[in-house]
Image (cartoon, rainbow, N blue to C red):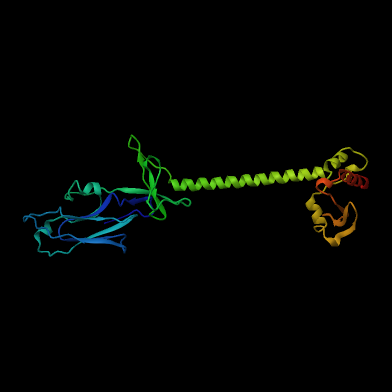
Amino acid sequence: MSLNLTGTRFYYSDSKNNFLSSGCGNLATIYGNKTDNLISRFLQPSCRINNKTSSIIGCLLIIPEGLSSFFANMSTKVGSSDYRRKRSCGFVSLTSYDYVFPNDFDTSNKTHVPMQLQWSTPISGECHLNDSSNTSCIFNGEYCWSRLSPIYLCACYRDSNGISYSRSCKGCSTSVGTLLLLLATWSLYKALKRKQKILLKQKYFKRNGGLLLQQHLSSNEGNVENIKLFTSKEMEKATDYYNENRILGQGGQGTVYKGMLIDGSIVAIKKSKMVEGKNFDEKKVERSINEVIILS
């Protein structure tokens, strides 16, 4: 006989089941599948109990962990002249531990026997469980252990109505929570850096006469409306990042560069020499803005 649970979320419980072989003079062989992976084999003794036929003599074998399939075979190994062997019932199967001992190995007149399964859940994320004790206990007695890769086997607790429930392994939930916390921290850091950059731009725009220039642009005086504002990146591109070969002249207020705009227009671009700190002169800023207004 064979039963295969491979590909499902169920395994044969190694703590609740045994391989059972009963009968007289039979050789039982257990494989993990039909072709190889021998688990064990055991030979039943010849039955000679008060010259009566007996079929209750049996052998038990502990099953390996993580068993999802098995193939059981029984063959005759004791001489065919043994009358009692002919009359005995040969049986081999995976059987629930709770069934074997109350019935004292008696499988006569049985067409089926119970066995107990345990379920598993696939790993999602990286979990580090306490391998020293093989378990990672959480509330209500539920636990999981990592002895069987690539799955965690989890035990369920029952409520007062006998209904089983399950929860995720503690290690997985902790890993997911840590990942979410790291993502949230990184997002907050990026948002603060963007905000800091915006505030810094506003500070230097105001410090270098940007507000004064905006006042002139909105006053509708003369040809002021013809003034066009460019970003610092546009100026860098127009002057080839303020290449020294583009310098047309230098003065006390700044350096004049030859620039070319996107539309091909050739322009003169003046980069002011603004001094930071205590030596910052607001009058020089005002004179520079007035110069722009006059040239426009």
Quarter the N terminus occupies: bottom left
Q: Nearer the viewer, residue 209 or 40?
A: 209
Residue drawn 72% across and 46% down?
197
Give the total number of marks visible in the rendering.
0
Which residue is farthest front? 278
Residue depicted at x 84% and y 61%: 244
Where in the figure is residue 285, as x and y percent of width and height? Answer: 87, 45
Residue nearest the observer in this picture, 104 or 279: 279
Q: Is residue 84 left or right of residue 99?
A: left
Q: Residue furthest left?
A: 51
Give the percent coordinates (x, y) of residue 145. 39, 50
Q: Quadrant of residue 33?
A: bottom left
Q: Residue furthest top?
A: 160
Give the camera-side residue of 211 and 130.
130
Q: Residue at point 79% right, 45% down?
A: 204
To which quarter of the image does residue 289 belong?
top right
| Residue 88 located left or right of residue 124 | left
| Residue 290 occupies quadrant | top right
Q: Could you say where residue 78 lies in the image, as x and y percent from the top left? A: 14, 64
Q: Position of residue 86 (x, y in %)?
A: 12, 59
